[in-house]
Image (spheres, rainbow, N blue to C red):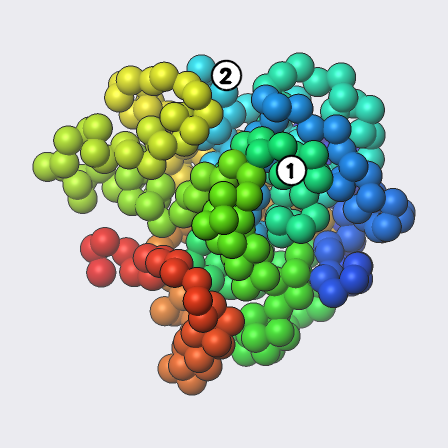
Amino acid sequence: MAEIEKRIGRPFFPFIEYKSITLPPMPPIVKDVHNFMDSLRNFNSRETDVILCSPMKSGTNWVHEIVSMLLHRTTEYNSHGELNYCNFECQSDWDRLEKMNSPRFFHTHLPMEYLPRKHVENGYKIIYLNRNPRDRAVSQYLFLQGKTGVPPMTWNEFFEKFVVNDTIYGGWFTFTKQFEKARVEKRGTVLPVTFEKLKIVSQNEFKTFHNIHLTKLFKPFREIASFLGISVDDSFIKEIADKCAFENLKKNKIDTTVSIHPEGRSTLWRKGIIGDWENWFTVEQNELFEKLYHWEMEGYAVDFIYYSPKH
């Protein structure tokens, strides 16, 4: 935590342009974005590596914790271990990654085309995490507010600039279409996971599904474990689900994003719910986004849950 505190106030805007996308100004990206992207594409992946790929504000830290617990067969939080800092976009010391023990677990918000070539071409494991784009947009807006260098803007201004014309990491539509295409064409070994399905079976939702057998309830957790080649029982998965329930993570996980808030404030964990977008999208915005979604996603069969099960 001391290292994080030293970096408090690091700018998170303006974004860095690279080809047709924009990237948050992480130090390695600011230093030389072309060198960084080349290093990432040429990264020496191992067969045992796992990469978690997700758009910003889609539950990355949450699922990262779940996968870390499964890989290490433990329910201890990974707030200080080496896996905690394996965000590709923050890497400036690629040699350090070479020295890490297997299995290595990385995460990124970049679309498929920018992943390490060796990882994709050799069919190494990718967990493709996504979230319904409406909730994700609201979460991203609230996360960016107040960050060092980010200009203040209303929700309406954000909607026009970063939802309708989204280029951050290439945008949600680009990310989703690339991974859906890879999944359907079986390019690489890709496991699709959605924020909403994991949320529904998290510990905080047990009371809603009290009459469902645990094996069925924990199906998304079991699918991740099976994908990783790990055998687990219901009691272990239940313990992981409990430890990784939103409120428990909010209380126990270190938030590394305090470094990009001028006062070192933690804003990573907010509500973690399904359907909050209804409190933000106007009727006109919802209709516009619906048209944009159908135009962008034509030919892609992707289903998301937009309302809480209690809706």
Point out the image quarter for the N terminus.
Answer: top right
- Residue 94 percent location from the top left of the image: 80, 29
Name which quarter of the figure residue 135 lies in.
bottom left
Say what secondary structure mark 1 lies in. helix
Taking the spot 74% from the left edge, 65% from the top edge, the residue there is 20
Q: Nearer the viewer, residue 132 or 253?
A: 132
Q: Which residue is mark 2?
A: 72
- Residue 169 percent location from the top left of the image: 66, 57
- Label 2: how many residues lie within 10 Å, few (<14), some (14-19) or many (20+)? few
Q: Amino acid at mark 2?
A: His
- Residue 110 percent location from the top left of the image: 65, 50
Judge from the rendering whether residue 162 lies leftward or rightward of residue 95; answer left or right: left
- Label 1: how many residues lie within 10 Å, few (<14), some (14-19) or many (20+)? few
Q: Which residue is mark 1?
A: 121
Q: Nearer the viewer, mark 2 or mark 1?
A: 1
Q: Does residue 59 sit above or below 13 in this rendering?
A: above
Q: Please tell me the numbered disc located at residue 113.
A: none
Q: Amino acid at mark 1?
A: Glu
Taking the spot 73% from the left edge, 56% from the top edge, the residue there is 23
Asked whether residue 254 appears in the rendered view, the answer is: no
Point out the image quarter for the C terminus.
Answer: bottom left
Name which quarter of the figure residue 207 lies in.
top left
Q: Does residue 164 sit above or below 258 in this rendering?
A: below
Mark 2 or mark 1, which has the lower sequence index?
A: 2
- Residue 152 percent location from the top left of the image: 67, 69
Taking the spot 72% from the left edge, 62% from the top edge, the residue there is 21
Q: Are marks 2 and 1 in contact (CB under 8 Å)?
A: no
Asked whether residue 223 appears in the rendered view, the answer is: yes
Say what secondary structure mark 2 lies in. helix
